Image (cartoon, rainbow, N blue to C red):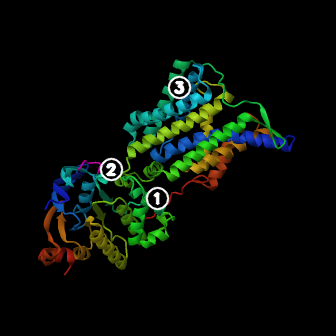
Amino acid sequence: MYIAAFTWTEFAQQVVAGLRQGAVFAGLALALVIIYRSTRAINFAQGEMATFTTFICWSLMNQGLSFWAAFPIVLVIAFVGGVTIERTIIRPVENGPVITIVIVTLGLALLLNGLMSVIWGGANRPFRGPFSTRTLDVGGVPISVQDIGIVAVSFVLVALLALFFRFTKLGLGLRAAALNRDSSELVGVRVGWMLAFGWGLAAVLGAVAGMMVAPILFLDPNMMQVILLYAFAAAVLGGLDSPVGAVVGGLLLGLIITLLGRYVGFVGEALKLPTALLLILLVLLVKPNGLFGRVAVRRV
Amino acid sequence: MTALLQLDRVEARYGPVKALHGVSLEVGASELVAVLGANGAGKTTTLRAVSGTVRRTGDVIFDGAKLARRPDAAARAGIAHVPEGRGTFSELSVWENLRLGAYTRRGSVKDDAQRVFKYFPRLEERKSQQAGTLSGGEQQMLALGRAMMARPKLVLLDEPSLGLAPMLVAEIFERLERMRAEEGTAVLVVEQNAGLALAHAARAYVLEVGNVVVSGTSDELRANESVRRSYLGY
């Protein structure tokens, strides 16, 4: 084991790169948390849903649309798609055991993956992103516009969501429906629609994460699979039912694996994921509900 | 007089177990009516049948129209159900709980909140506190306050005295009575403490194993030998 040569300039670059990765994890982790809070199930199709919508973006751009023209269209399609999936596929098993819902989402992942191969083929496709890869000089540190752009888009999205949940009636209804279904119905919240709305939001978050990461990774049907693993890890680290935890967990995880991969010799590229998971295991030993998770205590 | 709420031979069941065997009752506009009975008599189920949180057959007429069997439909029609255990959201703040009370209504919630704070000043002090950290009495006030936020025509209230000190219970009933008089809100209250309920209610129904066995004005029930012996204990 050795520690690589250290300069502050490079360290700053690595931190930005870590935040950029973390922002993508955070977006996807937040999507998982939103669905987990309302249905108590992990959505294994989250990655495939994100890739699918990214392919739609790719197709629109092939039709001659610019990225920013395609972006809002994709978000609307993602939202409608998420709502439709909940209403048609999840709804029938909604009151069943959690394992049933999980299996259904696994099946959905396989289905979407197959559909993508059929529609767009399995090959890697370059995806022209909205941000250039040239660098800007930020206080003497060269940082790529792409990194700054990805972090900025993710932050704006999370901030908008936070405002939505906190200050709008619909946001309050969504939170209430996730916390206590029966009481929500008694005050007139349409809980079924709230669950569908949550799936719509999760699909939008995934779409943004997919479109941000595609220029870096190349687009293929399996693009989000490893990222989804990191997003699970981030969500568990933050606490599966805490949206704040998902964001913090995602950013932390991005930073940790980037810095470990760069500075701790034996970790390198290959051992990043297992090392990150080991760290999370250690955190969970001390805080079993994650950093921000609700401790399962009930007043009786 | 046409009643605000009318139950016509309503039956309700939990799976294979029938809990109500044809209950008929009425609540007039701005009337306080009590439902009395022993544990398992079907008091809570009666309220749940009205708000549609249990499977029911038979007609529930509210405000001149048949009520759909969906809790959010009941809420939208103007029925606020304060269930057993109060149904507040312990993870949300007092203010958010109140906002949820007005969920079915459009427009500002500020004026309604001021009205609620007039009855329950304590809630204003605790506005930004998590509801789960309130005392039992304060939570009951929050549950009532949240019900008021909806400007309901009828409040269904399940065991407001449960787990509260007798003084607090008297206070809750006193506010309830004031609310009824000033706001014209009808109340259908289920209560174990029959003496207290009869002291405030205009009329009452006594349930036994899912059937109404006695009904009448509070004075009539207090004068009824069997009611007195079974429920008032003297």
Give me the disc on residue A113. Answer: 3
Tell me the magenta residue range: B67-73
Q: Is residue B154 visible?
A: yes
Q: Would you identify the image quadrant in which residue B82 lies?
A: bottom left
Q: Is residue B14 magenta?
A: no
How far apart marks 3 and 2 lie (CA) works out to 38 Å
Using the rendered image, report if marks 3 and 2 lie on a common chain: no
Whole-percent x and y of residue B53? 29, 52
Q: Disc 2 designates what residue?
A: B72
Q: Which mark, residue B96?
A: 1
Left or right position of B187 against A166: left
The amino acid type of the residue labelled 3 equals Asn
Q: Residue B101 is drawn in which quadrant?
A: bottom left
Amino acid type, residue under disc 1 in the picture: Glu
- Whether tag 3 and tag 2 are in contact, CB under 8 A, the answer is no
Q: How far separated are the C-alphas under marks 3 and 1?
A: 41 Å
